[in-house]
Every structure is written in C-alpha cells, then in structure tokens.
Amino acid sequence: MFVLVPLLLGNKTGVFSQVFAAGLAGVDVSHHQDRIDWGEVIQGQALSFAFVKATEGSDFTDSLFCYNWEALAQQGLKRGAYHFFRGYGCGLEQAIHFLRTVEMANGDLPPVLDLETLDGTVEQAVVEEALIWMQTVESVLGIRPILYTNQRFYDRFLAQTALSSYPLWIARYADQAPVLSDGKKWSIWQHSSSGCVDGISKKVDLNYFIGGLEELEAMCWRPSLPVSVP
C-alpha cells in the first residue's frame, strides 16, 4: 500500500510538502492555470515530468498548449500531451484532431486520453469510441497511449474493458493510493487537485509516477518511422 510521506525539498516544503519515499513527482496543467513561468516551476520544485492539455473533442485546442509545449521543451522537463474525450463525439475524428495538433519529439511521454464523463451517451458507445481513439493514436505513433480517469469512473465503466489494458493514470484525492476493482496496476496517481507551485498562479494537479527515471524513460516515444497523420 502506498501512502503519502512528508518530504522536505531543499530549504522549504515546496510544492510537494507531501510526496513519496520512492517514485517521481509531476504536474498536469491546462489554460485554467493561466500562463506559467516554467523556469520558476523547475527551479522551485523537484519535478520530473509535466502533462499539458492539448485538445478536447474534435475541434477544441487549448489556448495555452503551444506555449506550454514549447516552454517545456526549452526547459528540458519531460513532457506529455493529453486529450479530453467527449463522449458524444467520434473517436476517429478526436484522434485525428489530437494528432494534427501535437507535434511530438523523441523522448516525449506517451499521449494521454482523459476519459471521465459519458456526456449523456450510452456507456458502451463511449468505451467503443474511446478505444478507437487509443487504437488510432497507437497505430500512427507506434506507442501505447495512457488512459487517465478517476477511480470511481474506472471502477464503474472501464474495469474489465479493452481500455483497461492500457497504461493507467488514476485520480484519487486521498492519502492512500488507488486500488482498482479489477486488480489492474496503475502507472501514475493524481493524488491532489489543489497543489501550490511556484511559477503557477492557480491551484494545480499533483501526480506521482510509480518508478524511477529509467522506468519513466522506458515509457517515452522513440519514433522509428516518420509520422503520417490520416
């Protein structure tokens, strides 16, 4: 069982006043955090990675994605991009929108599908369309995407579906780590949505990767062929 353990970062408690005795710390952001000073973020906190929102549905692009994506590359912080899935939309169209928006580079973290709402659509249809998104992105990039969701949504709608076979990033805001109903293991735990981080003016999500730098690097995108978006 994983529990949060206080850890002093430098001369102050910093962003992760409660982090872990092992594993890596990271954040995820979108335009809701406003414009971020990534230089200050990296100097003030012991972070190993950051995920940024890229797209939503079949036509929405986060207004600060390009800024965040380029700034993370300049700062040398391991980066990943995520897509917020709309249950009423077509999985293929949403995948193409993401692939046309995100220009990945060697060493980036896998793409992420954020699936946390049915949007009033039948459960089976949402799972099927989300699976199309995952399969399309994987076929184009040659890497298995990560599935992000919260523990309650996973246990109710996604456990023991084809989506559960993908690397899992689970949100559970508590002192104890997620334990999924189907016994699946997660790779990333989002343990807080109210972190205070130097360089970020708004509250931010805090994450824990279960593993070290070698394991994080092993997850990353290493293209063998040029990307051809359908």
Image: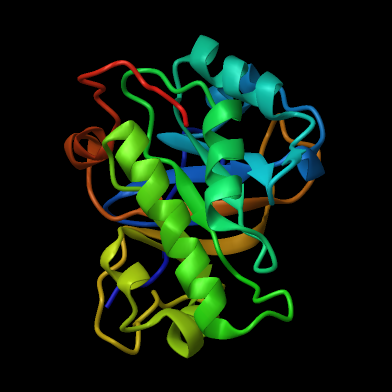
Where does residue 183 sit, x and y in percent of width and height? 24, 83
Indicate left or right for 230 with 100 as reference. left
Q: Where is residue 44 in the image (x, y as percent from the top left)?
A: 58, 28
> Is residue 150 positioned above or below 188 on the image?
below
Q: Residue at x 61, y 28 (%)?
A: 101
Say whether residue 197 is visible.
yes
41 to the left or right of 136 = right
Residue 78 location, quadrant: top left
Q: Which of 151 and 223 is in front in this view?
A: 223
**Res 16 seen here:** no
Q: How is the image coloured?
A: rainbow
Above or below for 38 versus 175: above
Q: At 34% across and 82% down in the image, what residue appears?
A: 179
Instruction: Give the tally of numbered discs.
Output: 0
If the image is split into quadrants, where does the N terminus sit?
bottom left
Outermost residue toward the top in this view: 74
From the viewer's side, name the closer residue of 146 and 4. 146
Q: Is residue 26 left or right of residue 117?
A: left
What percent of the width, then of the height, locates residue 83?
58, 47
Residue at x 55% of width, y 53% of height: 206
Q: Where does residue 209 sit, x and y in percent of width and height?
A: 35, 51
Residue beneath the point at 26% across and 35% down: 142
Q: Quadrant of residue 2?
A: bottom left
Q: In which quarter of the image is residue 105?
A: top left
